[in-house]
């Protein structure tokens, strides 16, 4: 049961893999506007759920700690938006893919295997998808940030990992590019 639920939750991450495609086809402005639209739409549902106790179609997908706070997909959208606005395009797309692919697969793995294997998968997948846009050393540094953000214990997280993963990875990658140039 846990694995089936995790697959459903990670479907949102699979959609995130399309972000670079939208970026390449439609450009940065369209992507920003699209994510803002999705963020407004999802915020409306979260408002209904949190302030008015209205059950929404995705309520069964929420984790226990999300019952009385913003759901992870809202942080996912905020993470994408923040990366696209703040970081250079290659860094933003690499960080978004680390969130979408790395965290998506690592989350499923956490349901069926040890945390160490899931962390290794997060690192390897994040490194691989980062290399689509950036050199290997830069991608590896971003993957370290993504893995650390993903595996911080819940009580140490001040925000959801769907926001921390792209911000940690993008910050490290952007700094490494700055230092290399």
Image (cartoon, rainbow, N blue to C red):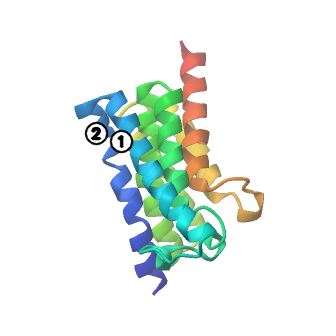
CA–CA distance between discs 1 and 2? 9 Å
Q: Which of 77 and 134 is in front in this view?
A: 77
- Residue assigned mark 1: 34
Residue 10, x across and y down, in percent: 42, 65
Label 1 crowd (10 A; few <14 / some 14-19 / many >=20): some
Q: Choose top left, top right, bottom left or bottom right for residue 69.
A: bottom right
Considering depth in this image, is 154 or 136 the residue closer to the camera?
154
Q: Residue at x 54, y 63 (%)?
A: 46
Which residue sits furthest left?
25
Residue drawn where x is 53% and y is 28% of the image: 86
The answer to whether marks 1 and 2 mark residues whose Cβ atoms lie closer than 8 Å is yes
Q: Earlier in the sequence, mark 1 or mark 2?
A: 2
From the viewer's perspective, tell me whether residue 136 is left or right of residue 70: left
At label 2, counting other C-alpha atoms closer than 10 Å, the crowd grade (few under 14, some 14-19, many 20 or more) is some
Q: Residue furthest right?
A: 156
Q: Is residue 144 left or right of residue 132?
A: right
Question: Where residue 155 sits in the image (x, y, percent)?
Answer: 77, 63
Residue 37 visible to the viewer:
yes
The residue singled out by tag 2 in the image is 22
For the view shown, which residue lies furthest in the top direction? 181
Measured along the vertical axis of the image, is residue 13 above or below residue 98?
Answer: below
Q: How many marks?
A: 2
**Residue at figure coordinates x 50%, y 66% from the top left:** 107
Tell me the tag on residue 65. Answer: none
| Circle 1 SS class | helix
User: Who's the residue at 53% across and 73% down the image?
Assistant: 62
* Position above or below: 146 against 46: above
Q: In which quarter of the image is the N terminus?
A: bottom left
**Closer to the camera, 6 or 60?**
60
Q: What element carries label 2?
A: helix
Whether residue 121 appears in this view of the structure is no
Q: Position of residue 73 (x, y in %)?
A: 49, 58
């Amino acid at each position: 049961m846990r694995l089936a639920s995790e697959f459903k939750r990670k479907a949102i991450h699979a959609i995130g893999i399309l972000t670079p495609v939208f970026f390449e086809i439609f450009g940065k402005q369209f992507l920003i506007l699209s994510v803002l639209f999705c963020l407004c739409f999802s915020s409306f549902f979260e408002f209904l759920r949190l302030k008015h106790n209205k059950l929404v179609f995705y309520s069964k997908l929420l984790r226990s700690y999300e019952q009385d706070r913003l759901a992870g997909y809202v942080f996912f959208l905020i993470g994408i938006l923040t990366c696209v606005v703040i970081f250079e395009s290659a860094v933003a797309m690499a960080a978004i893919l680390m969130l979408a692919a790395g965290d998506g697969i690592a989350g499923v793995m956490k349901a069926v295997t040890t945390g160490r294997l899931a962390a290794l998968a997060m690192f390897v997948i994040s490194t691989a998808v980062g290399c689509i846009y950036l050199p290997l050393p830069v991608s590896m540094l971003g993957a370290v940030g993504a893995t650390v953000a993903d595996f911080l214990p819940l009580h140490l997280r001040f925000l959801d990992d769907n926001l921390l993963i792209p911000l940690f990875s993008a910050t490290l990658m952007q700094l490494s590019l700055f230092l290399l140039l």
